[in-house]
Image (cartoon, grey):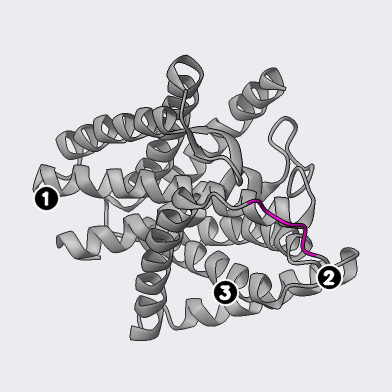
Amino acid sequence: MLRNRILTALVLAPVVIAGVLLAPNDVLAMAFALVVLLGAREMGRLGGLQGLGPQWLYAGCVGLLMAGAFLMRGHAVAQSLEIAAALFWVLISLWLFSRRAALKRVEGGRPGVLLLGALQLTVVWLSAVKLHALDANGPALLLFVLLLIWTADSAAYFAGRAFGRHKLSPAVSPGKTWEGAAGGILGACLAGLLLWYWVLQAIEPVGLVLLCIVTAVVSIGGDLWESLLKRQAGLKDSGALLPGHGGVLDRVDSLIAAIPVFSFGLTFLGNGL
């Protein structure tokens, strides 16, 4: 399985990096929208919708929500959605870290999951497009947050395997440990210092490193949130599109939480977003 994960990553990573750095903003918006819609179909499955028809209908509704959000991207409503998403991910991450109760299978449709999933998928798409459109540094900033989470994920994986002893959230994701999370946070600190040195020296480095730490922490929360939904739905993976990775949501669950938090954090730090 690890071999399949590595091979898939080796194929996808150059495509993603080239797309983020070279594609015009409207092209990137359409490409990322396709990824989000594929994830939305899987979210419909996690929300209890049975069959491809209802799941793709749900994905179409998410697409309409994204189109409406794009038209309002400069409006206070869109900014409020990003702030609400950032607050949600901080709070849900803290709750998931402290959760110890056993999970029960949930049967049937789950309207709350479907609504919340639609909103979160819309906001992450909007935040990513917004970051990418930010003057000359936009593509580099979007690529950075991707590399930040990939670095934190990898550091957490290897730190957890080497030193993991204490379970982070055993009822939700038994494989995750506090030691692995600490490794991921250390990786985020190093990535933040590199970003400050190469791109964002106008921002106070301590604030930027703290933002990277918070982003890494909520990325773990995003991963745990999807794991919670899968366990409640009785599913091992959200889908089977990516060999070794499962579905689209299995690959981007961390980013769904991380990108809005990073985007809002840069705004808060005064980068003029």
Quickly name the residue at label 3: 66
Who's the residue at 46% across and 61% down the image?
92
The amino acid marked with disc number 2 is Gly
Disc 2 vs disc 3: which is toward the camera? 2
Q: Nearer the viewer, residue 99 or 143?
A: 99
The amino acid marked with disc number 3 is Met
The image position of residue 248, as x and y in percent, is 67, 48
Quickly name the residue at label 2: 108
Who's the residue at 50% across and 26% down the image?
157
Relative vertical location of residue 40 with respect to residue 181 in this rendering, above or below: below
Q: Badge 3 local density, few (<14 within 10 Å), some, or many (20+)?
A: many
Q: In terms of secondary structure, where does tag 2 sit?
A: loop
Please report whichever mark, 1 or 2, sits nearer to the chain's N-terminal start: 2
Residue 241 in the figure: left or right of residue 112:
right
Relative vertical location of residue 226 with respect to residue 112 in this rendering, above or below: above
* Image: magenta residue range: 102-106
Quickly name the residue at label 1: 203
Please report whichever mark, 2 or 3, sits nearer to the chain's N-terminal start: 3
Q: Badge 1 local density, few (<14 within 10 Å), some, or many (20+)?
A: some
